[in-house]
Amino acid sequence: MKIAICGGTGFVGSALVDYWLQAGHQVQVITRKLPDLHDPGERLTYINWEQLEEMPHLLEGLDALVNLAGETLNQRWTTRAKLEIVESRVTTVSKVARLLDKLEHKPEVVVQASAMAIYGTSQTDTFDESCPQKSMNFPSRVAEQWEIAADAINNVRLVKIRVSLVLGHKRGAFPLMKLPYMLGVGGRIGSGKQWTTWIHILDIVRLIDFTIHNKEISGPVNASAPNPVTNDEFGRTVGKVYHRPHWFPVPGFLIKTVVGELSVVLLQGQRVIPQKALDYGFQFTFPTLTDALEDLKHRGLSD
């Protein structure tokens, strides 16, 4: 297969590149800046947006396009940062839509990143793909605008991957989440009752690949493991797997003081179930948090 990835140098994108190269596919990475030391290979090439605007035919013959590009939410949400977060997502989706309109032979499927934040937050509700969107805070509004922009992608099968907390041992949020435990000061955040919905990096890569190959899948797909946990349970599992104490709670007001409005991500949660993936028969390699963390620990020890 020939697959293009926008955001292919990021956490999930780079894992996808490795996975598909190992599977023998041809991969094109669409990026803002070409790597300084990149040596084009037979099955891996890099293209920047300026090149594509001048030569959109470079994307002719694609089997699939995956768009993961977007400014990270893991930063203090100043007015400027919020604008960049929204614009980076909406602008990239619009570029993808315009590029596809110029192609004579469009890819069969586009997998567009979104976020589980689109459901809003709750300590009591459980969300799956049939649940309505709920615009109640900045992350949910970002996800809503992201998906509205994606609806401009026409005449192809469109999959919206609603991403949860992705766990990896080197990149992403987990190394920072694990750090307090490695220093002996791990504990729950706030009440600890807020839900943490997560997925192992290998499973989100496999799920994206699964949606590309399964032609019956379209629309929203929750990229989350089937067993979400509370924040307190998440921390206790980290402590158990890494043999560290879980005893030092961080009060909510301190989190709000340190990270500002970003605290909504840490102090409020949502219990999200990957119902569509399960209905179509996707098998999770790491269905439980213990399974996932044991694997990440093993990978860390083997480096």
Image (spheres, helix red, strand yellow):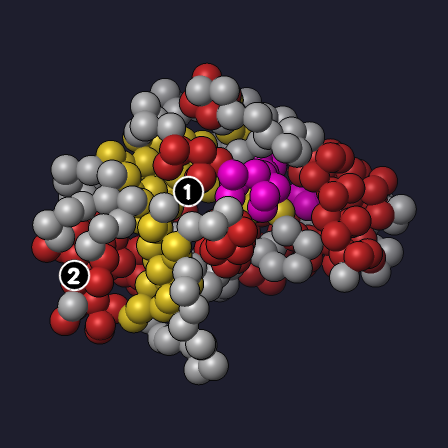
Name the residue: 69% across, 30% down.
288
Q: Residue 106: image x %, image y %?
A: 18, 46
| Residue drawn at 22 percent across, 72 percent down | 51
User: Residue 195: within the magenta?
Assistant: yes
Q: Residue at x 78, y 49 (%)?
A: 297
Query: Residue at coordinates 34% horizontally, 50% vertically from top-left?
Result: 2
Q: Residue 140, how many percent across, how many down?
A: 38, 42
- State the mark number for residue 57: 2
Residues in magenta, as a range: 188-206
Picture disc at residue 91:
none
Judge left or right: residue 75 versus residue 54: right
* Residue 165 figure quarter: top right
- Which residue was labeled with disc 1? 115
Please indicate, yes or no, whether residue 27 appears anywhere in the rendered image: yes
Mark 2: few, some, or many residues within 10 Å (few <14, many ≥20)? some
How far apart are labels 2 and 1 at the CA level? 30 Å
The answer to whether residue 248 is left or right of residue 76 is right
